[in-house]
Image (spheres, rainbow, N blue to C red):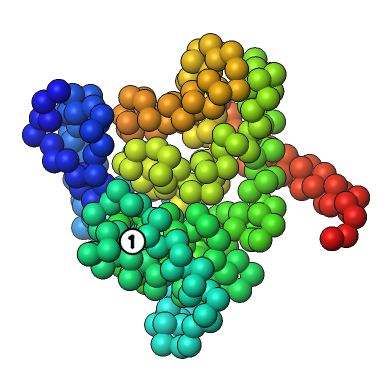
Amino acid sequence: MAQSNFSAVDEYGFERHEDFDYASYEDFMSVYLKVLASRAHKWSTMLGEGKSVKRTNTIKRYVRKGIPSEHRPSVWMAISEADKMRDLAPDLYHKILDSPFEKELVDIVKTDLPRTFPDNIYFSKEANHQTHLFNVLIAYAHNNRVVGYCQGLNYIAGLLLLSTKSEETSFWLLKVLVEKILPDYYTRTMDGLIVDIEVLSELVKSKAPDVHQHVINLGLPWAVITTKWFVCLFAEVLPIETVLRIWDCLFYEGSKILFRVCITLIKTNKEAIMACNDFTSLAECFKAIVKNASALHCHEFMQSIFKVPGTLSNATIVKLRDRFAKQRREQQQKEPPR
């Protein structure tokens, strides 16, 4: 297949594999570039008028339709209120980097650096992003001793660096994600993550009961399917531009967006999932659905996450979280001490 006019490396530095479908990508970009141009004009007009980015219905609508890449750093900081966290301790990041590091944390973080986006030219040994990534991760590990360093944070911090091109901005966005938007996902017990996988299972059970039962019948635990989805916030799972569009909404609307994405992926691929007749084929199916054309066409995909799952209120998610968190605590109390 001819490789069209597109480079073998995308704008974020990710190498396109030999089986990359350039024809589908060119078809997608021919439409999406017009969307990007339109959104960029509207954002530039709004921000050029000196309007501050506040949490309003207009901003929410703009965010759902996509934040232009040049505005993402400042807009993400504003809509997540990470800028308010930074303003309370403006010198924090640099103070941490100027302080001594714990050898154990240094060793753990350095172990994961070469594993982070190995197919990205900016994270190669010759590039300097591994140094930037180390700084962000080691600073966060020392700042939040409860979390320290948890696998998965390297992908999130890495993508933040690629998007913001700023260590300090990436540090504060990582901080707001871990401590405000996704509490208890990255602690040693990962209670928040485990509970949210149970919440997703229950949501699928109510919104796509036949799919839920089919997955249960074939014996594939939801944790096997979705742990990476949640831990990496779809980085290294979905196409890069789709991930960034999800993060646009995640920073504004919170973790509910993750459930909307999961349910959309499951419901829109129902036919393929139901056609699987054993554990192995089902596992392969879930690997394939995050790479198909519908996931690549990020603008249409993002429109679908607000339609396909139907009603999904924060109150429902909170209620389910409370229920499964209580069950988890009761189970832990029954277990003998180690």
Q: Quadrant of the C terminus?
A: bottom right
Could you tell whether 216 is left or right of 95 in the image?
right
Front residue of this view, candidates 28 and 24: 24
Could you tell whether 78 is left or right of 45 in the image?
right
In the image, what residue type sits under mark 1? Leu
At 80% from the left and 47% from the top, the residue drawn is 328
At 13% from the left and 41% from the top, the residue drawn is 7
Image quadrant assignment for residue 87: bottom left
Provide the residue designation for mark 1: 161
User: Where in the figure is residue 81, as x and y percent of width and height?
Assistant: 47, 63
Front residue of this view, candidates 107 and 220: 107
At 84% from the left and 52% from the top, the residue drawn is 332
Would you say residue 75 is visible in this rendering? no
At 39% from the left and 73% from the top, the residue drawn is 135
Could you tell whether 3 is left or right of 197 in the image?
left
Q: Secondary structure at mark 1?
A: helix
